[in-house]
Amino acid sequence: MESPLLPAEPMLWSGWGDPARAAELPAPVRELLTELLGVRPPAAPAATFGEVRLPPAALPQAVLAALAAVTGEEHVRADDDARIRHTRGKSTPDLLLMRAGDASDAPDAVVLPGSHEEVVEVLRLCAEHRVAVVPFGGGTSVVGGLTPARRGFAGVVALDLGRLDRLRSVDPVSMTADLEPGLRAPQAERLLAGHGLTLGHFPQSYEYATLGGFAAARSSGQASAGYGRFDDMVVGMTVATPRGTLEIGRAPKSAAGPDLRQVFLGSEGAFGVITSLRLRVHRAPAVRAYEGWRFETFAAGTAALRRLAQEGAPPTVLRLSDETETMVGLAKPTDLGTPGGDSGCLVVAGFEGAPGDVAHRREHAAALLVEAGGVHLGPEPGEKWAQGRFSAPYLRDSLLAAGATVETLETACFWSDLPRLYDAVRLALLGALRSPSGGAPLVMCHISHVYATGASLYFTVVTAQTGDPLAQWAAAKRAAGEAIVAAGGTISHHHGVGRDHLEAYAAEIGDLGGEILRGIKERLDPAGILNPGVLIPVY
Ligand SMILES: Cc1cc2nc3c(=O)[nH]c(=O)nc-3n(C[C@H](O)[C@H](O)[C@H](O)COP(=O)(O)OP(=O)(O)OC[C@H]3O[C@@H](n4cnc5c(N)ncnc54)[C@H](O)[C@@H]3O)c2cc1C
């Protein structure tokens, strides 16, 4: 996969991505949305940057001065620009709040440490002064992972890890690389490309998300079938906690007790700050080939994906869109607004690697997909998907501006539960988002992460905004969450827990599970300053 150019910095404060790529929906698409979904322009235009309401910064001057003594004055920022750009993450509710000019969750200051030692010292100071600390990577959380509970704290600082952006070393014998957590994915890929290597981690948030965020939220990229999830790539890490430093991972696998890496993978900044990662790397692929296949039904496509996952040598990228997603063309975001070309369900299969390996896996996959009822569509749908793979988040902004509510959610389960989970979540979303006038929302789904034993389901909804789109989505999300729990799915396959999934996560791990997490938290972070209110169930 070719790394797109490193986009402009900083990210659009009220939406996704490179501000230069923000675009209005073409008029025919707006008309289609009105006709099909009843979408009308929102009552009020989005707030401008100058109109954003920001609470007064609460941190005492003495604390700011102490932090500045650690990192240097220029790396402690309490200006409006820094505070607004570190407010919340990039879920649709986050964007709706920012579009409404609400920055009430802004941190009081943004601190940018330049080394592991500075992180340790900042944590020590914040614990002493009871200041909450939110580790901040790319700011792309979609589960409220950057919105701490401030009650009981003297203030909140966002700990922006952007200055920790080095490739520290490469071990070409072990095929590992030591990288710092503030590296954004394209920066990391560019540095590794200099050594002929790749991580192979390409989530849709690729342009802005960081390595630390991937580890802390257990991210999974679009090429997970071939390169694995991000947590599979982490072989070692350094973590700064208010109680000191942990160095974890001295061998790829170990029988020396429980694997402490797993305590910090997915810990969402609540147990410590990841300041370095040792990651498994791959040789940059010599060949990349993407192609499309068509299946009559989602069920038939699902059965084919399962066989590919279970019978060895799967493609590097493997995804199946359901009938609605295929019809709308969201499977190929560059084609949005030209529906009707494809019927059935689109499978995108992408192969990356050495020529012989790619040829072998393509042949194996083709034989299996044909046997399972697939029709080969050639390279075009696959290449189109690859070109448009990072476009959908920009489209979300355009849809919000046009008056649509658009959001995604994801889950995972074992293969045998998958049809039931798919139906349950779809029905829950359709029911919760049906407009009073009877208009049905668009509910689309794809499978894009497969394992021998199960897969994830990723839903996207588009519907007409009501007068209160936040409440509208909250009701839909609640209904979908209940359906996931009832149908035996996990509340998140790769977005994490944050604040949004706390209740369902608590139910998923049970009382004793919650107690274990609280025990770890109390040991590592006795003052409770790290990302309070995120991840840890409180009873
Ligand atoms: C448009 C869009 C598309 C997305 N697509 C995908 C996708 O395809 N796959 C996927 O997995 N996710 C996806 N996400 C979710 C998000 O990008 C991931 O959760 C990602 O891992 C977050 O990385 P980040 O650097 O932005 O972290 P942030 O959002 O800054 O932080 C995420 C959490 O990790 C904590 N954290 C961050 N850095 C550290 C650190 N160094 N040490 C300790 N804690 C830390 C934060 O406190 C927070 O709780 C998407 C999000 C958006 C907005």
Image (cartoon, rainbow, N blue to C red):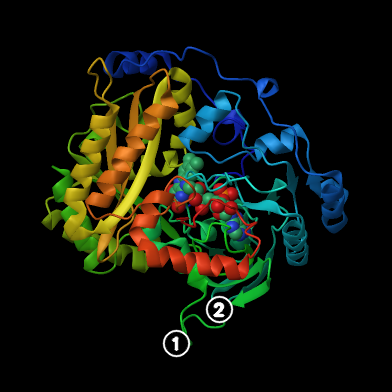
Whether residue 466 is situated above or below residue 242 in the rendered picture: above
In this orientation, which residue lies closer to the viewer: 391 or 138?
138
> In 3D space, how far apart are the residues under numbered discs 1 and 2 (Cα atoms)?
12 Å
Q: At x 60% / y 20%, what residue is drawn?
A: 47
Q: Is residue 481 left or right of residue 74?
A: left
- For disc 1, the marked residue is 255
Three-letter amino acid code at the position of disc 2: Gly
Indicate the position of residue 108 as horizontal and vertical percent values. Answer: 72, 41
In this orientation, which residue lies closer to the viewer: 476 or 506?
506
Indicate the position of residue 216 as horizontal and vertical percent values. Answer: 53, 59
Say what secondary structure mark 2 lies in. Answer: loop
Three-letter amino acid code at the position of disc 1: Ala
Placement of the C terminus among the 4 image quadrants: bottom left
In this orientation, which residue lies closer to the viewer: 31 or 109?
109
User: Which label was assigned to residue 249?
Assistant: 2
In this orientation, which residue lies closer to the viewer: 333 or 459?
459
Q: Earlier in the sequence, mark 1 or mark 2?
A: 2
Whether residue 19 is situated above or below residue 6 in the rendered picture: above
Whether residue 247 is situated above or below residue 138 in the rendered picture: below
